Image: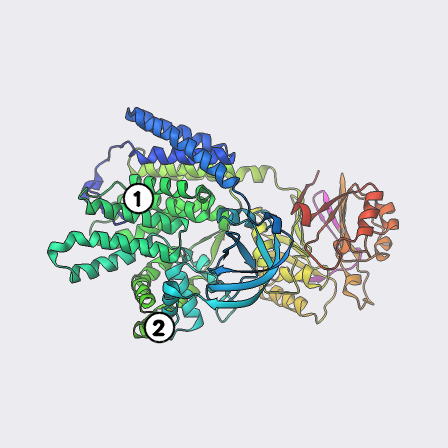
């Protein structure tokens, strides 16, 4: 096979000789070296996978017969270990400021606030709207939460990878002066004579600034950034090889027409300078750093007359440079997706060679590059985002044509600054066309998925090995579907043989949401929510947690009462996952309840008004409604809360909503193993009489940061006096309680 690399090694040209069976080649030296460095970083982090990576590196380096290569692998492994330890133990300049109310001034880049003194960075919540620039802001410094729900986003670790350990909450902007200089000039060029949404899109695509586009919505309320993800086009806003290829390609075309033929070699240093300037403009991130390094290495090789480089060698060198600079990038999803995508694209020419030769080469490559990249990144995408776009191939084919013009034109607009109106008359319609395309494919169905276990990653690895063996004609084609079938059965069989049986008290902040999973029925009681802000707890917290746990449908959803912190999140849940039945206590004109009922009507979910004595038997589990008794209803929503008791042969618990004492004592609950305390542990809950009756060994309090004094100290004292162990979601996160 004749191989031709592009500037950054992501597309390779096949020829007819690809039909002959290729011979295996030992990997180039940077490959085992990069694996050794990765192994050292992982060992420093305490991950057992690091030993496997190091052993693989030595196994690849030893047969080469190069003692220096084995020694280099050992040195790089040690360097990776040391750099990871330095990264983990770096001093925290803001540690003594945690808990303080402060006013800070620094450079805001749309993602983080960079302070001059002390030299540190921190995140802001909420993020300021508007451009990057010099920002004065006040708020309270806290340490961020980690992963607190199944499949949840580990915000603390993500910030740590960015070199940040603190967040300024309740951030109030005092002054924001737009950035001046080259970056300010460039940003102005991306907004002249453009709508707010068009400008936000261009800053995301050209500069990787996704803060403003994350706040944009389509007319029907669909978030623009979510639509990019659902369409399989999120990578367009993550600066990577595509940006580098289009930038270098456009400059190469321009220089070929401006420079005399005898000055052809002079274009390489100019292109290298342009790549360096581009990296300075957008700032280093894992994906763009990888692309610039690979592009720079290829350009340097061509300039020095060394010819084209091996794609795996260039990729290995880029990984070594990136991880020595910032070892934490190894744990960044952008880093993982970027390198995996290149590995997937490296086999695209061989796959393209299997298509009919009469098809144009560009068409064959266009048809295979997206599936190759998706196959390589599949486990990371499913594990991290919990969904796989089903129409990403046509979406990417259509978007590629727009991006081929939009990206170079956008860079030209940025260079023109305030004079960009001469090109923005064309750039605006192109941005609108891309937004329209995203809106269309962003409403297409997606395949949802849960968190992938180590066994799932192992099965995927076996499938990829089988795919490569088939592609290189080492085994027959029928092996591939057989491996896929056996692998799918191996991962699905345990859940069938031993279905989940547990209660999951989800950490939804200052709210309430409990999932009950039994072999015969899955019930969700409340979905959290917030009376302030636009954060959708149902879409952003509850639904991802359900998908992460492999919950594909809910038999019953219970809206205990109309308080926003209990049912607001259920609106997105009912719209986002199949529901068998919705239980409510009474119909009121509360806006949240009305929206929930409309969502149930849209999804054709039966609505049932339950009363005391209603019950459902699901195998050994019996769900009984203990409250409300019916009319007349109280004027206080809390007094009308639905109370559900779960009885099993060796386990008893109750879910009280916000029902206050003394109504708790009128329920006749009986003895409990676990008490789900009412109303987030308010002073009106868990009275002495009720605790004496129920005698629970454990109590779960669903609570978050609040100004209501929840949980009340008197309630905690009563629980302690009764010998009850307390589990608080604000302290331990989500509580998962196995059912016997």
The residue sitting at the left extreme is 262
Residue 72's label in the rendered image is none
Colouring scheme applied when the structure was drawn: rainbow
Q: Is residue 621 visible?
A: yes
Q: Secondary structure at mark 2?
A: helix
The residue range painted magenta reads: 605-623
Residue 622 painted magenta: yes
- Residue where numbered disc 2 is placed: 418
Residue 346's label in the rendered image is 1
722 and 706: which is toward the camera: 706
Question: Which comes before the other along the chain, label 1 or label 2?
Answer: 1
Residue drawn at (75%, 41%), measured in percent from left and top? Answer: 651
Task: Indicate the position of residue 387 as horizontal and vertical percent values.
Answer: 49, 52
User: Against 499, is 77 above or below?
Assistant: above
Q: Is residue 574 visible?
A: no
Q: Nearer the viewer, mark 1 or mark 2?
A: 2
Report if the CB atoms under discs 1 and 2 are less than 8 Å apart: no
Q: Residues within 10 Å of mark 1 (few under 14, many from 20)?
A: many
Q: Residue 705's image quarter?
A: bottom right
User: Against 493, is 449 above or below?
Assistant: below
33 and 575: which is toward the camera: 33
Whole-number angstrom distance, CA of label 1 to CA of label 2: 41 Å
452 and 536: which is toward the camera: 536
In this picture, residue 318 sits left or right of residue 305: right
Residue 109 painted magenta: no
Task: Indicate the position of residue 428 as horizontal and vertical percent values.
Answer: 36, 72
The residue sitting at the front extreme is 117
User: Against 687, is 417 above or below?
Assistant: below
In this picture, residue 70 sits left or right of residue 600: left
Q: Secondary structure at mark 1?
A: helix
Residue drawn at (32%, 28%), measured in percent from left and top? Answer: 69
């Amino acid at each position: 096979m004749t191989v031709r690399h592009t500037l950054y090694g992501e597309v390779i040209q096949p020829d007819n000789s690809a039909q002959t069976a290729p011979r295996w080649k030992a990997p180039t030296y940077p490959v085992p070296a990069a694996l050794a460095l990765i192994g050292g970083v992982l060992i420093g982090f305490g991950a057992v996978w690091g030993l496997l990576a190091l052993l693989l590196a030595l196994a690849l380096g030893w047969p080469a017969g190069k003692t220096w290569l084995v020694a280099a692998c050992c040195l790089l492994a040690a360097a990776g270990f040391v750099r990871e330890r330095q990264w983990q133990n770096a001093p925290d300049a803001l540690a003594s400021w945690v808990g303080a109310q402060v006013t800070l001034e620094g450079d805001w880049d749309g993602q983080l606030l960079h302070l001059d003194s002390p030299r540190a960075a921190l995140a802001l919540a909420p993020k300021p709207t508007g451009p990057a620039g010099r920002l004065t802001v006040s708020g309270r410094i806290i340490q961020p939460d980690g992963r607190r729900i199944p499949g949840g986003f580990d915000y603390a670790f993500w910030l740590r990878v960015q070199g940040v350990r603190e967040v300024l909450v309740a951030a109030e902007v005092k002054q924001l002066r737009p950035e001046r200089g080259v970056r300010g000039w460039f940003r102005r060029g991306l907004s002249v004579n453009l709508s707010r949404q068009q400008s936000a899109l261009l800053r995301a695509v050209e500069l990787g600034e996704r803060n403003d586009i994350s706040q944009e919505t389509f007319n029907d309320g669909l978030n623009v950034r979510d639509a990019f993800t659902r369409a399989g086009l999120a990578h367009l806003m993550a600066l990577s090889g595509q940006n580098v290829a289009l930038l270098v390609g456009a400059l190469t075309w321009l220089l070929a027409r401006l420079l005399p033929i005898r000055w052809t070699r002079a274009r390489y240093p100019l292109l290298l300078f342009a790549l360096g300037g581009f990296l300075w403009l957008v700032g280093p991130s894992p994906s763009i750093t990888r692309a610039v390094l690979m592009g720079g290495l290829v350009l340097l090789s061509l300039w020095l007359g060394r010819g084209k480089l091996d794609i795996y060698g260039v990729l290995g060198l880029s990984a070594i440079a990136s991880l020595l600079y910032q070892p934490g990038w190894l744990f960044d999803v952008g880093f993982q997706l970027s390198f995996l995508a290149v590995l997937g694209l490296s086999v695209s020419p061989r796959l393209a060679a299997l298509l009919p030769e009469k098809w144009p080469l560009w068409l064959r490559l266009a048809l295979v590059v997206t599936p190759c990249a998706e196959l390589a990144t599949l486990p990371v995408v499913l594990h991290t985002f919990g969904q796989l776009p089903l129409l990403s191939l046509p979406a990417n084919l259509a978007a590629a044509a727009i991006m081929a013009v939009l990206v170079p034109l956008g860079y030209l607009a940025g260079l023109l600054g305030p004079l960009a109106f001469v090109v923005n008359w064309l750039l605006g319609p192109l941005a609108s066309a891309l937004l329209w395309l995203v809106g269309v494919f962003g409403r297409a169905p997606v395949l949802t998925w849960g968190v992938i276990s180590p066994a799932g990653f192992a099965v995927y690895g076996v499938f990829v090995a089988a795919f490569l063996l088939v592609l290189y004609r080492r085994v027959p084609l029928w092996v591939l579907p057989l491996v896929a079938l056996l692998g799918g059965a191996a991962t699905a069989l345990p859940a069938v043989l031993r279905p989940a049986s547990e209660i999951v008290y989800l950490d939804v902040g200052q709210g309430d949401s409990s999932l009950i999973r039994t072999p015969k029925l899955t019930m969700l009681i409340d979905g959290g929510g917030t009376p302030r802000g636009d954060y959708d707890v149902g879409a952003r917290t509850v639904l991802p947690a359900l998908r992460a746990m492999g919950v594909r449908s809910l038999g019953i959803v219970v809206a205990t009462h109309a308080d926003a912190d209990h049912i607001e999140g259920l609106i997105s849940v009912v719209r986002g996952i199949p529901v068998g039945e919705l239980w409510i206590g009474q119909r009121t004109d509360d806006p949240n309840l009305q929206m929930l009922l409309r969502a149930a009507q849209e999804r054709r979910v039966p609505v049932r008004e339950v009363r005391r004595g209603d019950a459902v038997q699901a195998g050994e589990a019996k769900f009984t409604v203990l409250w409300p008794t019916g009319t007349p209803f109280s004027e206080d929503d809390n007094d009308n809360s639905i109370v559900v008791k779960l009885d099993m042969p060796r386990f008893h618990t109750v879910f009280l909503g916000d029902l206050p004492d003394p109504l708790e004592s009128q329920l006749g609950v009986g003895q409990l193993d676990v008490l789900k305390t009412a109303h987030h542990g308010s002073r009106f809950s868990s009275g002495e009489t009720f605790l004496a009756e129920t005698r629970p060994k454990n109590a779960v309090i669903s609570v978050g940061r609040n100004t209501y004094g929840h949980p009340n100290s008197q309630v905690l004292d009563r629980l302690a006096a009764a010998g009850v162990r307390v589990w608080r979601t604000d302290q331990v996160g989500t509580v998962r309680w196995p059912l016997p």
